[in-house]
Image (cartoon, grey):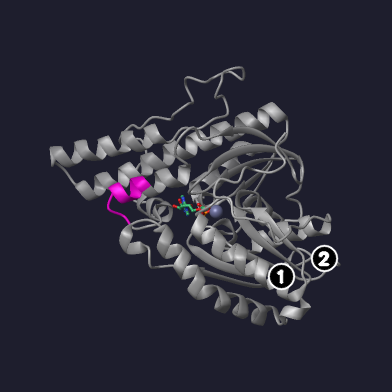
Amino acid sequence: MSFRGGPVLGIESSCDETSAAVVSEGRVTGHVILSQDAHAVFGGVVPEIAARQHLVHIDGVVAQTLDEAGIKPGDLAGVGVTAGPGLVGALLVGLNWAKGFGYALGLPVVGVHHMEAHLYANSLESPDATPPFVALLVSGGHTLLLYAPEWGTYELLGSTRDDAVGEAFDKVARRLGLGFPGGPEIEKLARQGLAGTYGLPRPMLSTRESPGDAGYFDFSFSGLKTATSLLIAEIEQAGTGDLDAARAHIAAEFQAAAVDVLVTKTMRAVEHTGCRRVLLGGGVARNGPLREKLAAALEPAGSMFAPSPRLSTDNAAMVARLAEYRLAAGQSDGLDLNADPALSFPGLS
Ligand code: KG4
Ligand code: ZN
């Protein structure tokens, strides 16, 4: 089954968003994202619930997407689906749905990498977001710093040695008694606080200062998370002053520390590669201070691209866009395509 061009259906089910999209030559014509709210009471995503919810909703989400695009299944030219990384039960629902649908309609199906898809979200909105570029991919499960000389070819410069930055936002938010996901809650609370009121560490900045140092481009967020937790415990135990004001100051300082590290490491990659075009991707790319500080650091000769908020967090438009590239390059998968919860980033040199 070869790809002859035409609308591509994308399916995303790696975590707690059930999403489908139709993309045609880089234009989104239909897109539905259903964020499962069943996890909120648990303060985090429950894998079993995620898989079951995908199963309940996937038919309806695709039907609504095709409706929005004004097409019938027979008008599609191909299918793209997230094959990993992610929660295996959740991934399997989308993957098997896509394989069955593709087989029934005689369409080529291609499995894509979730984090590479986050990168491609940029190309849906910014025609200039093209290689060569430095990429900072920041989500709930990953923190990756890459250099891309061309689409599909990547040099991995750095990654986190422990927690992903989004995970740190979520855990600190939980410790502060905020809702899930924690990133947007911390950003909101931080607006009422002052960074620097309390001091928190900027991990792997001061001890890895020269390009030859191991970890010069790497991240670590576990220590920052623990330091924040200890600071909260200290303030709670002292029981003095305005705890609510303290919480806002802590949120502001935690966010400032995380952003400082992300921006500094990204600028190291910019200096190292000599490439001043930077693409952001993943849920944490929604963070206002991260966007502002990175854009300012790249002034005057650089440029930063970040997807709009809806295309930064998990969505199927980015999956369809990457699938469109892959299908047009003659790539597709067989029925043996399987979900891989730890799928490694493709095209790494
Ligand atoms: O890409 P994504 O939707 O799912 C994964 O692939 O993990 O990213 C979700 C992550 C969560 O950790 C969430 O707290 C974080 O993105 N996030 C934010 C913001 N919005 C979402 N982090 C910081 N600031 C935000 N405004
Ligand atoms: Zn994601």
Q: Is residue 89 magenta?
A: no
Q: Residue 139: x percent and y percent? A: 52, 48
Q: Residue 15: x percent and y percent? A: 50, 58
The region drawn magenta spans 171-178
Task: Classify 158 as above or below 104.
Answer: above
Disc 1 residue crowd, few under 14, some 14–19, many 20+, Cα 10 Å: many
75 with respect to 65 (left or right):
right
Identity, as a three-letter code, of the amino acid under mark 2: Met
Task: Classify 278 as above or below 182.
Answer: above
Spatial CA span between label 2 and label 1: 10 Å
Q: Quadrant of residue 96?
A: bottom right
Q: Decide which of tag 2 and tag 1 comes sooner along the chain.
A: 2
Identified at 45% across, 35% down, the residue is 162
Identity, as a three-letter code, of the amino acid under mark 1: Gly
Location of ligand 2 given as a quarter of the image: bottom right
Identified at 61% across, 49% down, the residue is 115
Q: Is residue 177 magenta?
A: yes
Camera-nearest residue between 176 and 339: 339
Q: Is residue 28 visible?
A: no
Q: Quadrant of residue 125?
A: bottom right
Please tell me the numbered disc located at residue 1. Answer: 2
Asked if disc 2 and disc 1 are in contact, CB closer than 8 Å, the reply is yes
Q: Main secondary structure of the magenta part?
A: helix
Identified at 51% across, 61% down, the residue is 90
161 with respect to 22 (left or right):
left
Please tell me the numbered disc located at residue 124. Answer: none
Q: Secondary structure at mark 1?
A: helix
Say which residue label 1 marks: 102
Camera-nearest residue between 167 and 323: 323
Q: Secondary structure at mark 2?
A: loop
15 with respect to 230 (left or right):
right
